[in-house]
Image (cartoon, grey):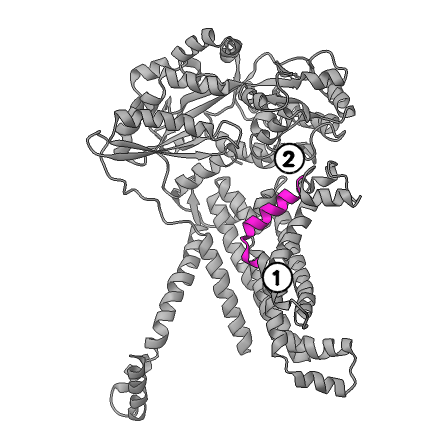
């Protein structure tokens, strides 16, 4: 009996110690001293995702240059830069907020949910009226949502935008004897089968945790579906969407025309495989172009409008990435304002867009880029037509997370059941 | 300091019948056990209380406490469609990993208890998987299992077993094969500790009992099952209990290899706890950690009870 007790006690203590380890860290430090006025030194923090291919940290260099320029002019303000991959950006931010250690500035996805919690400054409280006026109006409008006070206001400050397109490898198309770019889903399936016959992966379908919400949207839009219906209600398990995933399962995944197990595959990995000539077709953004330049594919690719069930999509998917300003450290407000006005200048917007072939969020940069970089003009002109994520809905963040978690299973098991589960998260039931 | 106290303790005893001293004497043991009690209260009991408390609060996605929530977190948790599968998988995970680890470790320990040239080096090598970070081990296995160019796939391809670029070779992409590989890695990292515990046990068995068995003409097999195994019981028990808890709470292997996916198909309760928290369901996650905690305790007690019953039956 004694041994039993000793062992049980050891066991109890060990499991308790483990349980203790898993409980959260002590609350973050609010001790950073210094008032917002530039006479006292202050350190503000910025959390941003890496836009380039993961082996090159060039987004870090981009921000670091802005920070160096800014610090040269404002020696009392230090900017602490933290980078994350898209794959773990949301987790990193959520964990920081949960630990009461939110960054002052966050660049990336959704803002509506945090704004509703009263954690954000309004855009008009932070950036100067000139900067605010300079934002492309309909993109700035996307940054509007209900704050904790129940009133609609702009909380998300757009930083960069992009539209999506369908990319294909012209070399592989020639080898497979395909002459025209696909316009419909049936074309995609037929061409993918021909590409498989020459030993390549037909279509890259990244439904893993990185950006499954984009791939899902692109395909469901092609069938007249999407995340919300015309009346603005969540419609993730709509018949059109279920049909879309059923079609993907039956016509691309089961016949082996995609990479194996799409549910676990990341966009960045598949983009690299496409650049290496292993995949024939893939959905991409202009940010894919610099990756293609580094890959063996060279210039042997083209991009066209994304095929839908009966014809190409007439409104491209637009994605806007927003900057959110957290109000947890009140004494950082003035410094953050100053930095943001500085960072949203034309020259930095243009530099970013030229580097990644993404689109700007400010009007002066859009105007100048349209003439300077003709390749971007059609994308910039298409921005007003684009279909956007429902990011001003506070339910979008949890919904987007759930999509990333499980939507990949919709092409291997029961699509309706999977979409029902996501719909339940969106409607909060 | 201690000797002084001890002496006074001894001095007090004969005087107990007189006066008010006994009350003080009753408190004397506190001087010894007090620090331990304080440590347990602070490092063990307090976190448990906090954990149980947080499972009854309503948390915003971002960790703001929005007041009491009663048992809502629990009812939400038990309504999670994936919970049943996760619990079942956790059971399979613990039973298979611990059983295989114990069986393999018994064999490994037997081997390493023999005298053979280079035994010291071999024993050192056995420590490696234990000494290496579990996360690194999991990552290396993940790389070795990559479809197309992972080392294990190249090896299997060369042996003519699996086409390394076929869908089968995407081991971690499928729910079942992914989970089986994760269990294999869990066994791999559990073997060193278990083997060493068993080796230590083997070394405590006196040579005389083996001699006696020989005299009685027992066969090797009979000696192993009737002498070695029963005498190993204490060390096996320790190894099994610690393994059960370790394996039950294991997180890095599954997280690094498959992130608990596709979907939640390779998640155990420990991984699912993190998934819930990541999705912003902090309360539910806290509720699951309470459930997890109770489960470990129940499993360990049940296990000990069963082993005890075995001893009495002998």
Q: Is residue A386 above or below residue B99?
A: above
Q: Residue at x 32, y 44 (%)?
A: A29
- Which range is magenta? B130-146
Q: Nearer the viewer, residue B106 or A12?
A: B106
**Residue where numbered disc 1 is placed:** B126
> Could you tell me residue A278's position as x and y percent?
68, 27
Pick the quarter of the image with the N terminus of chain A.
bottom right
Chain identifier of the residue bearing label 1 in the image: B
Q: Residue at x 66, y 53 (%)?
A: B184
Q: Nearer the viewer, residue A53 or B243?
A: A53
Principal SS element in the magenta part? helix
Is residue A70 visible to the viewer in this orientation of the structure? yes
> Could you tell me residue A337's position as x and y percent?
29, 25
Chain identifier of the residue bearing label 2 in the image: A
- The residue most toward the front is B117
> Could you tell me residue A348's position as x and y percent?
39, 19
Q: Residue at x 56, y 47 (%)?
A: B272
**Residue where numbered disc 2 is placed:** A263
Q: Is residue B144 magenta?
A: yes
Task: Determine crowd level at label 1: few under 14, some 14-19, many 20+ residues with C-alpha closer than 10 A.
Answer: some
Is residue A185 visible to the viewer in this orientation of the structure? no
Q: Is residue B54 left or right of residue B81?
A: left
Q: Is residue A328 left or right of residue B311?
A: left
Q: Is residue A418 above or below residue A214?
A: below
Q: Give the quarter of the image for residue B239.
A: bottom right
Task: Determine crowd level at label 2: few under 14, some 14-19, many 20+ residues with C-alpha closer than 10 A.
Answer: many
């Amino acid at each position: 009996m004694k041994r039993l007790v000793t062992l049980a006690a050891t066991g109890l203590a060990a499991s308790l110690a483990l349980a203790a380890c898993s409980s959260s860290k002590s609350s973050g430090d609010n001790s950073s001293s210094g008032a917002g006025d530039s006479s006292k030194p202050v350190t503000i923090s910025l959390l941003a995702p890496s836009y380039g291919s993961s082996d090159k940290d060039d987004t870090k260099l981009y921000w670091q240059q802005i920070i160096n320029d800014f610090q040269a002019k404002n020696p009392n303000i230090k900017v602490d830069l933290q980078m994350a991959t898209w794959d773990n950006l949301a987790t990193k931010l959520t964990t920081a907020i949960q630990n009461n250690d939110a960054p002052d500035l966050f660049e990336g996805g959704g803002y509506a949910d945090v704004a509703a919690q009263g954690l954000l400054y309004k855009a008009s409280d932070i950036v100067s009226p000139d900067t605010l006026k300079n934002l492309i109006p309909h993109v700035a409008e996307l940054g509007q949502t209900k704050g904790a006070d129940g009133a609609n206001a702009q909380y998300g400050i757009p930083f960069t935008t992009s539209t999506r397109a369908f990319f294909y490898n012209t070399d592989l198309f020639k080898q497979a004897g395909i002459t025209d770019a696909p316009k419909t889903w049936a074309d995609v399936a037929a061409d993918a089968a021909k590409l498989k016959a020459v030993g390549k992966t037909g279509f890259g379908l990244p439904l893993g945790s990185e950006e499954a919400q984009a791939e899902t949207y692109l395909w469901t839009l092609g069938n007249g579906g999407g995340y919300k219906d015309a009346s603005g209600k969540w419609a993730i398990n709509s018949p059109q969407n279920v049909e879309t995933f059923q079609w993907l399962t039956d016509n691309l995944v089961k016949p082996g025309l995609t990479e194996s197990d799409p549910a676990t595959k990341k966009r960045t990995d598949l983009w690299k495989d496409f650049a290496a000539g292993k995949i024939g077709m893939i959905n991409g953004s202009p940010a894919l172009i610099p990756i293609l330049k580094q890959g063996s594919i060279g210039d042997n690719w083209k991009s066209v409008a994304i095929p839908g069930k009966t014809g190409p999509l007439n409104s491209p998917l637009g994605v806007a990435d927003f900057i959110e300003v957290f109000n947890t450290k009140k004494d950082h407000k003035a410094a953050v304002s100053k930095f943001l006005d500085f960072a949203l200048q034309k020259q930095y917007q243009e530099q970013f867009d030229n580097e990644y072939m993404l689109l700007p969020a400010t009007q002066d940069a859009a105007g100048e880029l349209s003439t300077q970089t003709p390749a971007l003009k059609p994308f910039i002109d298409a921005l007003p037509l684009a279909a956007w994520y429902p990011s001003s809905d506070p339910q979008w963040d949890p919904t987007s997370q759930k999509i990333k978690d499980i939507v990949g299973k919709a092409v291997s098991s029961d699509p309706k059941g999977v979409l029902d589960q996501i719909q339940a998260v969106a409607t909060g039931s | 300091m201690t000797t002084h106290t001890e002496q006074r303790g001894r001095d007090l005893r004969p005087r107990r019948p007189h006066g008010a001293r006994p009350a003080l004497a009753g408190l004397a043991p506190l001087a010894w056990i007090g620090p331990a009690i304080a440590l347990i209260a602070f490092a063990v009991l307090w976190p448990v209380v906090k954990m149980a408390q947080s499972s009854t609060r309503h948390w915003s996605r971002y960790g703001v406490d929005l007041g009491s929530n009663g048992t809502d977190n629990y009812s939400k948790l038990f309504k999670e469609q994936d919970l049943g599968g996760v619990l079942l998988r956790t059971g399979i995970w613990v039973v298979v990993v611990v059983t295989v680890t114990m069986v393999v470790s018994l064999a490994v320990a037997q081997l390493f208890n023999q005298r053979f040239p280079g035994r010291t080096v071999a024993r050192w090598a056995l420590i490696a998987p234990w000494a290496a970070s579990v996360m690194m081990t999991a990552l290396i296995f993940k790389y070795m299992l990559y479809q197309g160019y992972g080392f294990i796939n190249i090896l299997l391809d060369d042996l003519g077993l699996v086409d390394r670029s076929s869908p089968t070779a995407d081991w971690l992409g499928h729910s079942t094969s992914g989970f089986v590989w994760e269990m294999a890695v869990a066994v791999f990292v559990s073997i060193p500790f278990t083997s060493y515990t068993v080796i230590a046990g083997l070394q405590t068995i006196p040579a005389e009992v083996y001699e006696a068995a020989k005299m009685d003409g027992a066969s090797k097999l009979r000696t192993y099952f009737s002498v070695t195994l029963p005498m190993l019981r204490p060390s096996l028990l320790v190894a099994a209990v610690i393994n059960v808890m370790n394996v039950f709470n294991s997180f890095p292997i599954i997280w690094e290899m498959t992130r608990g996916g596709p979907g939640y198909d390779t998640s155990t309760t420990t991984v699912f706890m993190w998934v819930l928290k990541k999705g912003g369901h902090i309360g539910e996650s806290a509720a699951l950690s309470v459930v997890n905690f109770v489960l470990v305790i129940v499993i360990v007690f049940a296990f000990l009870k069963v082993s005890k019953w075995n001893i009495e039956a002998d």
